[in-house]
Image (tube, grey):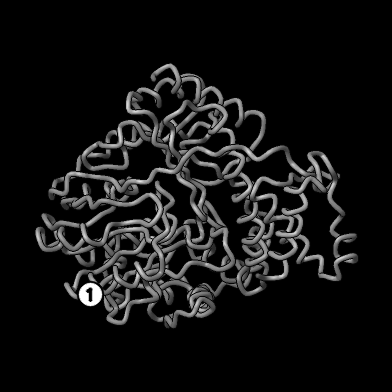
Amino acid sequence: MKLYETLAAELAQSIQDGVLRMGDRLPSVRQASTSRAVSPSTVFQAYYLLEARGLIRARERSGYYVAGAAQKLPPEPEQASQPDEASSPVDISERVFEVLESAKMRDLVPFGSAFPSPLLFPMARLARAMASSVQQLDPWSAVDDLTPGNPQLRRQIALRYLADGLHIHSDEIVITNGALDALNLCLGAVTRPGDAVLVESPTFYAALQALERNSLHAIEVPTHPREGIDLAALARAIERHQPKACWLMSTFQNPLGSLMPDEKKRDLVKLLTQHEIPLIEDDVYGELYFGDKRPMPAKAYDSKGLVMHCSSFSKCLAPGYRVGWAAPGRFTRAVARHKLTTTLAASAPAQAALATYLEKGGYDKHLRQLRHTLSVQQTLFMEAIARYFPPGTQATRPKGGYFLWLELPAEVNALELHRQALALGISIAPGPIFSAHHGFTNCIRLNYGHAWDERSETALATLGALVQKMV
């Protein structure tokens, strides 16, 4: 174990043995650092780990205290989904628009939101980076960098790939208007109307909307809530339907939060490569991991240039800046040409600001704090679900991101629950919007990326009571 894990384990044992009791104050970071002869950073990491496990709680300007007895958490879903694996046209947009429009109002409790709280991001530092970079912006850059994007930003992205062990040249990176633009450009580069595309079940509703908009057919493949897409079912679907592409999230999938193990990602890429099927990898949550290191994307196992890796800064640094990118491998030129004839270019000032921010450092420090906050909030949400929701409720336990997927008792109608909750000022994302076949009728997705406070807890209690009335 690492030093902070050893310290955390010792303190956890003291809590379990009753040496440290509920309400006891832990030594300050300075005291613990001195007495244990470790760095303050080690103590912070140990306390963060214990807080994420629900064993201690921070009190503002007071320190860390031993929490109450650990709450019993709701059980996890154990079965992979069982969708109709037929190739079918998609008709989902109207329902998605209805749900998303209703979730935009600021006075709603935003459990149905697709974004974390904007208060979690270093907006002041980004604004300063914007101010300084715009003053130095070469007027010709608006033309020179038109389609591939800002060269300094592409270099910084390539360096982050390199830090994770991926050797991707900056010339292979195409800057886009957010990740969704990158994903759509990749989809358009490798498919034509009428083609079939493999997707997870449940899957991100924007993927379904993209298929619908491009007159493509969806093949929903069984997906496990912990380990992602079922590779045996994927192989069967390939043989049966001869799809032209596969669109999925291998890391902290939306809405499940599932994380494919490294070996499974390797086997996924091997299977698709055997059939020359491009993989459009949506990796917007990869930086939001709760463990020691970032999970490797499927792109890491790509030797043939078939994995089109897409991500953005919207979920981890700069919401609203709408800057994403694609690393499309052998399809880089096709994606760049497609971009030139559609969205043309991303915002030059936003690209320059992000390049300046990344060059000056501080991004990893921000990410560590963001991951810690999300990890703690996940624990608090899970404990509240255990308190307020009826027996039969199951909830995923993602190792990153900011979504929980709840399987409610079979009698619950998620769309009706959405309507009732909305009338009480609470937004949720009902399961049917995550399926081309409008399945998952008793499931919901909850966002724990907003501050945990009395309003959030009251809203979860209200939501649990609504579910209880349906059972």
Q: In this rendering, does residue 336 appear at all?
A: no
Q: Quadrant of the C terminus?
A: top left
Residue depicted at 32% across the width and 58% down the height: 248
Q: From the viewer's perspective, is residue 24 above or below residue 331?
A: above
Residue 133 percent coordinates (x, y): 62, 69
Give amino acid for label 1: Thr
Judge by depth and name the residue closer to the eye, 214 or 10. Answer: 10
Residue 359 falls in image quadrant = bottom right
Q: From the viewer's perspective, is residue 447 above or below residue 139?
A: above
Which element type, helix, strand or loop, lies under badge 1? Answer: helix
Residue 348 percent coordinates (x, y): 49, 66
Residue depicted at 60% across the width and 44% down the height: 379
Q: Quadrant of the N terminus?
A: bottom right
Residue 227 percent coordinates (x, y): 38, 57
Q: From the viewer's perspective, is residue 270 above or below residue 409?
A: below
The residue to which callout 1 is attached is 273
Residue 200 percent coordinates (x, y): 29, 52
Judge by depth and name the residue closer to the eye, 37 or 250. Answer: 37
- The mark tally for this picture is 1
Residue 297 located left or right of residue 457: left
Residue depicted at 48% across the width and 45% down the height: 403
